[in-house]
Image: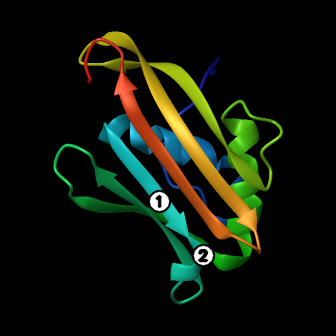
């Protein structure tokens, strides 16, 4: 498992700043806690693809951002390299971790990411924060 450093971005990047979207999404997941973020181009509406967080603890969903359809696939191609997997531009899975503050102390947060950016299987992202060392599970 690769350990990476993130610079969380608080403000949602504009469509033209799509290259920063992986850091924005991982930063939101770090802030929201154990759960997953999903995005799927097949659910595109009004020309936008939504990123939705689902809490593992409560099951509640929350909209966290969206990208214009034309910027979505280039953003997907940046998730792999941004998360320590330079070879995932189109399709794949990776595990990664980063240290981030939780309840006043620095803890390792562990992630699992699945990306599909090819026509055969669709254009989607599943990003899971599944463990915070010493906290969950």
> Left or right: 106 with respect to 75?
left
Q: Name the residue at the right extreme.
A: 87
Image coordinates of residue 112 in percent, x first then y, are: 52, 37
On the question of residue 50 being in view, the answer is yes
* Extreme residue in the bottom direction: 46
User: Dividing the picture into quarters, in which one does residue 23 lie?
Assistant: top right
Q: Observer-nearest residue: 46 or 85? A: 85
Residue that lies at the very extreme toward the front in this rendered image: 120
The quarter of the picture where the N terminus appears is top right
Do we see residue 17 in this rendering?
Answer: no
Which residue is at a point 77% across and 61% down the rendered structure image? 74
Q: Are marks 2 and 1 in contact (CB under 8 Å)?
A: no
* Residue 18 in picture, x, y percent from top left: 69, 58
Mark 2 vs mark 1, CA separation in Å: 10 Å
Find disc 2 in the rendering and name its residue: 41
In the depicted view, which residue is nearer to us: 24 or 14?
24
Along the horizontal axis of the image, is 43 left or right of 102? right
Task: Kindly identify the residue that appears in the image at 25 percent across and 18 percent down.
Answer: 135
> Dividing the image into 4 quarters, which one contains the C terminus?
top left
**The disc label shown at residue 38, or none:** 1
Q: Residues within 10 Å of mark 1 (few under 14, many from 20)?
A: some
Placement of 109 over or under 91, stated as above or below: above
């Amino acid at each position: 498992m690769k350990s990476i450093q993130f610079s969380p971005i608080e403000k949602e990047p504009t469509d033209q700043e799509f290259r920063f979207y992986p850091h924005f999404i991982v930063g939101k997941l770090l802030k929201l806690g154990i759960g997953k973020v999903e995005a799927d181009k097949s659910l595109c509406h009004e020309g936008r693809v939504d990123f939705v967080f689902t809490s593992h603890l409560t099951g509640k969903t929350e909209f966290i951002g969206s990208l214009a359809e034309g910027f979505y696939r280039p953003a997907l191609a940046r998730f792999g390299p941004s998360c320590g997997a330079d070879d995932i531009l189109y399709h794949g899975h990776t595990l990664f971790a980063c240290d981030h503050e939780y309840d006043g102390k620095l803890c390792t947060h562990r992630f699992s990411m699945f990306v599909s950016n090819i026509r055969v299987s669709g254009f989607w992202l599943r990003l899971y924060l599944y463990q915070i060392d010493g906290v969950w599970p």
